[in-house]
Image: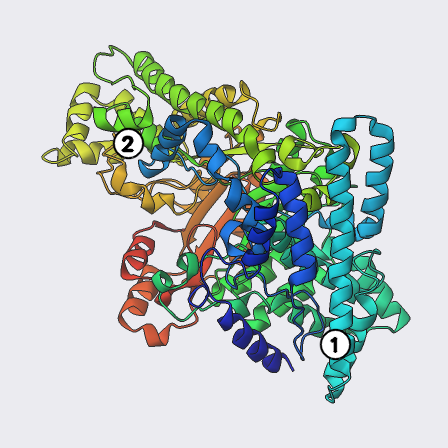
Amino acid sequence: MLDELKRELKAYYETKSFRRVPRPFNPLLGAMEAWAALHPGASALEQKVAQYEIIADGFTPVLFPHNPFFFETGLKMSEYDGCCEFSSGGWVLMRNRHKYRDANPQAHAEYCAANALGLHLAYGPYCDYDHHCFPFTRVLKLGLKGCYAELEAGEAANGNPETAPFYAAAKHSLMLVRKIAARFAEQAESELTTVTDEMTRKYYARIAERARVIPWEPPTTFYDGLEMLWFFHELGGVMDGVGMSVMGSPDRQLIELYRNDLASGRLTPAEAKELVCQYLVQTDCKLDFDSKTSEQFNGGEQGDTLMLGGVDENGNDVTNELTWLFLECHRELGLVYPKIHLRVHAGTPAELVNYAAEDFLMGRNVHDFINDDVIIPAQVGFGKDFRDVVNYVAGGCWEVIVDSCEHSEGANNYFSLGKVMDLSIHDVPEEEARLGMRFKKLGNETNFEEIYKTVMDNATLAMDRMLETIAKYGSLWPSVNPCPFFSACLEGCAQSGLDYSAGGARYSPHGVPLTGVAVMVNSLLALKKLDAQQVLAAVRDNWEGHEALRRKAIGLLHFGCESPDVVELTNRLLIDLTDVIARHKNERGGRYQPGLYSYIDVWQWAPVTRATPDGRRQGDYLTQGITPSRFHGDTVTGVLNGLSELPLERFPANSTLSLAVSGNGMEASQFGSIVRSWCRMKSSGMLMLNCVTREQLEDAMKHPGNHGGLLVRLCGYSAKFVSLDEARQKEFVSRSFLAR
């Protein structure tokens, strides 16, 4: 049955693939533009309500004969999460995003130039429309009916007439989603008049019944719970044009429904496993893993994530039957997506970590580990309630989000410390003119303190400009793309009467991910330990003709090694940087939330980041998060020790460490011990591992047919190694492969 489902899904999603549909993709564009022509003065909120109505009336429900779930509207491009131009939900955003540029064209151009020149990302450009988590915990508890009741109670208590449009739009959106679900029920009833296959009739009969109940009412069965997770994951982007990355935390959210079904005899373990497989298989069926990644959408990256494990609000370990079942099904199906974020802590069963380790040893480098003992204290220290924080998830690649309480805007402004070092050395007036900033240049300092001050002054200048620009022009967000449906389900908006884009949710953070820590720290160490003037001259020559000095710079004690001096300098730098961030409020009135991670900018920004004192030449790769430089061949133990004293409590958005370890002769228990040591030592918030050998990779480059199943972790996502383009393969092989 599962093979038939996969064939149905793949055949359908091929028709909605980026290769076949226009961008922007919006099958209802004509109806939306016709409405706009009749309402030229409509506000963004009025536009969004009209968008909802056109979607609810205009979509065609799609059911799959071998799929028990209902969700497909046909209004979203196959390969992505519905963000912006990839679904009908992006219409309002696309119509209004010019407002960001129009508000100040020069500021907009300078901000976007920072992206092109490798200083910081400008994805949005100011607000993160991607990397969301639908408020699963809340809607599973209340159903849309309960969310509606809270909106009514909030409106009655609010008393502010200016909030009336939000309340009206939010309540109307919930009724329209109820209508959308009912239309799936009607479609199932219609198809039951002609369907003869027994299994299909069973599925459609259940849809005909349950789609009139959920998601308006809370779930009462395990099937209901899975259905609501997938329904909202898919519909969130279709309705609001924002990317829904997270597929839920099923072991903590659905375990009681699962146990009740088994205890009552409503469901057998085999039937439950079949449901889990049907739920999990859907993302991979939208994607093409066999083409080269350069020919795949977004280079082969897709953001769907699933959370498992961790602690509950009593501090107890969550691990249960569903934790094991989802891991088991993911392995048996040979899936790449969803990415499984496995939350671990000091009390996580060793057997669970070892079981996950087996995937790595069989060439399935697809999971990652997130450390509750780092993330939860950092989030609580940032002013959030422990009872909320224990339900955190990671959206897309690593962006920590407190489920049902916030959108954390975790991945739209990666800030490169390596580029700050570049701008502190190389004088390129035309580049600084594009950025609208003039940076101090190193060269006249007489001691390290003066060197450090010059670099920090430049980092402060660039960071202040970025954060002030986001706060000023990002505040236009409610007039660009308000999201009353998403907000209606999010904690806090019913009480405040404000859209989440206006700061209405319980928390309104905005992530500030710093990257290239190793480049910055190692560069400062080189300027401190060697003759700074000689190093600067060599760097301005791109190290050409200075190989002996370059080897000295690379050979110094460095970020990630066990050195008190290195730790002291790193901690000073990170504390100073987070103090700068803490001075600012973001565009929604909340706090900026520091992090230590980055994405493919590790290689994309390398060509535009000139030589640095750590030994990098222009074009050499940068460093991701708090991953040490690939110039050094440290041991895993040494790296974990070297990072264990960092002030990670200052980085609630997450802190990522990516390591490649040799799998030669390694057993699952040994691999698991690495994870447990990392967790115990609190060496980062997130650990991404590859268990592979350089020899294995080089053989895969020569004989790809022998290694078709080898999956490697790139930078927040995994891909078949043989599907990578040659440049990406070489980048991966150039990483440091550490001994234990």
Residue 345, x across and y down, in percent: 65, 45
Asked if residue 346 lies left or right of residue 626, the reply is: right
Residue 113 in view, yes or no:
yes
Label pair 2/1, CB-CB below 8 angstroms: no
| Residue on which disc 1 sits | 270
Instruction: Choose mark 2 or mark 1, whichever is in front.
Output: 1
Local secondary structure at mark 1 = helix
Residue 317 in view, yes or no:
no
What's the image's color scheme? Answer: rainbow
Residue 211, x across and y down, in percent: 79, 65
Residue 50, x across and y down, in percent: 66, 49
Q: Residue sitting at 57 percent across and 47 percent down? A: 37
Viewer-proximal residue among 614 and 173: 173
Viewer-proximal residue among 224 and 216: 216
Three-letter code for the amino acid on which mark 2 is drawn: Leu
Image mark for residue 132: none
Local secondary structure at mark 2 = loop
Image mark for residue 556: 2
Q: Splitting the image into 4 quarters, where does residue 706 fall?
A: bottom left
Asked if residue 212 lies left or right of residue 238, the reply is: right
Three-letter code for the amino acid on which mark 1 is drawn: Ala
